[in-house]
Amino acid sequence: VVYFHGGGWVLGDKVTHDRLVRELANGVRATVVFVDYLNSPEAKHPTQNEESYASMLYVVEHAKSLNVDATRLAIAGDSAGGNL
């Protein structure tokens, strides 16, 4: 599972979503890759979209070293992360 956090583009990170992502990983018994993209105002559109796409490419290209099956990826997110 590749997970993109929510927070209305200005909030949210690995700290605010730690519990949620751990529960997701345990609940579905899968590896979860958490994408901690830049928030606004430090990053302007389309930076978050580009970072998200690059993270997906990274997961696919490094699937073996991440110990994941690149043919069985799920994408998830909440709020702004769901948009990505």
Image: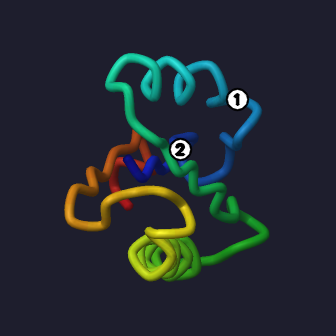
Amino acid found under the numbered disc labelled 2: His
**Whole-percent x, y for residue 75 in the image:** 31, 52
- Residue 43 image-quadrant placement: bottom right
Q: Residue furthest left?
A: 71
**Whole-percent x, y for residue 47 in the image:** 58, 80
**Is disc 2 surrounded by few (<14), some (14 to 19) or many (20+) residues within 10 Å?**
many
Amino acid found under the numbered disc labelled 1: Thr
> For this view, does 71 lie left or right of residue 50?
left
For marks 1 and 2, the one nearer the N-term is 2
Q: Nearer the viewer, residue 53 or 24?
A: 24
Q: Secondary structure at mark 1?
A: loop
Query: Above or below — where is 82 with respect to 56?
Result: above
Query: Above or below — where is 40 with respect to 61?
Result: above
Q: Secondary structure at mark 2?
A: loop
User: Which residue is label 1 attached to?
Assistant: 16
**Whole-percent x, y for residue 9 in the image:** 57, 54
Tell me which residue sits at (22%, 56%) in the image. 72
Question: Which image quadrant: the C terminus?
Answer: bottom left
Q: Which mark is residue 7?
A: none
Verify CB contact (< 8 Å) between mark 1 and mark 2. Answer: yes
> For this view, does 47 lie left or right of residue 56?
right
Q: Nearer the viewer, residue 54 or 41?
A: 54
Disc 1 and disc 2: Cα gap in Å? 9 Å
User: Which residue is label 2 attached to?
Assistant: 5
Tell me which residue sits at (27%, 56%) in the image. 73
**Is disc 1 surrounded by few (<14), some (14 to 19) or many (20+) residues within 10 Å?**
few
Tell me which residue sits at (62%, 19%) in the image. 19
